[in-house]
Image (cartoon, rainbow, N blue to C red):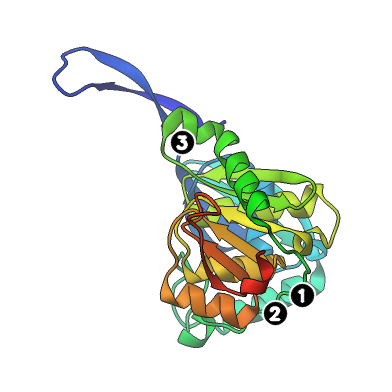
Amino acid sequence: MSVITAQARKFGSTQTQDLPLAEECAVAMSYDGTTQAVLMASPADLEDFGYGFSLTEGIAAPGEIAEIAAERVADGIDLRIWLHADAGQRFLHRRRTMVGPVGCGLCGVDTLAEAMRDLPVATGECVISASELDAAVAGMDAGQALRDATGATHAAGFFVPGRGLIALREDVGRHNALDKLAGALIRQHPAGLAGQGAVVITSRVSVDLVQKTAMLGAPVLIALAAPSSAAVAAARAAGIGLAARARSAARAEIYAAPDRFR
């Protein structure tokens, strides 16, 4: 768990004490020796991070990744991802066509068309009942050890009807948490599982989180906070069931693909 301590004092007190903080550092996503993005992240579950970021950003499918290695450097972590030949050539072509600097949350995006790119339409048959939504939210609340220790992190989990919450990842960044979840599903669970369940996030829903959910192949996205207008439009276009402000089924607001909830 990525926790460090720092000296602090309570307001009105003269005594200091060690208080837990969520660790945060710069993580460079490097492909075949070229940096694609630098993100501020929790330095844990880094192999999951590499696989998930590669998939959700459309850089490489899991089978196109040859190796991932994390190396501590002076200013953070260099997450070195090596691609098989065809994927590597495609990545180089993509880099050559970029006209500006790389940034994040829409990492490596340099045109308006890319920012609002077409998404794969969800094909999974997952349908979430009210009791399952409540179970998913309860599982998320119980599984956030880093949040409980520091109060400073987001989480993303994956819920499968009949099996419960099968994976959860935490990070100081909401995008990172979802990427790490995607990587965990890729590495630890059989292909195709993403289409059988729901992504559950503790944060608000911006369009890039819908895009990442679509690239993962999940047909349902449940969020504890509110969505943006672009996120709702993207979810509707991709056929993703979107329930927001979903701290319970009774309070949830369904914005897209209502047939995915019952």
Residue at (78% x, 61% y) in the render: 196
Nearer-N-terminus badge (1/3): 3
Q: Nearer the viewer, residue 21 or 72?
A: 21
- Residue 191 image offset from top left, x and y in percent: 84, 60
| Residue at mark 1 to residue at mark 3: CA–CA distance | 38 Å
Total numbered labels: 3
Of labels 1 and 3, the one closer to you: 1
Residue at the disc numbered 2: 121
Q: Nearer the viewer, residue 65 or 261?
A: 261
Judging from the image, what secondary structure is the residue with disc 1 in? loop
| Residue at mark 3 to residue at mark 2: CA–CA distance | 36 Å
Q: Are marks 3 and 2 in contact (CB under 8 Å)?
A: no
Residue at the disc numbered 3: 23
Residue 50, above or below 192: above
Q: Is residue 195 left or right of residue 106?
A: right
Q: Which mark is residue 123?
A: 1
Residue 171, above or below 3: below
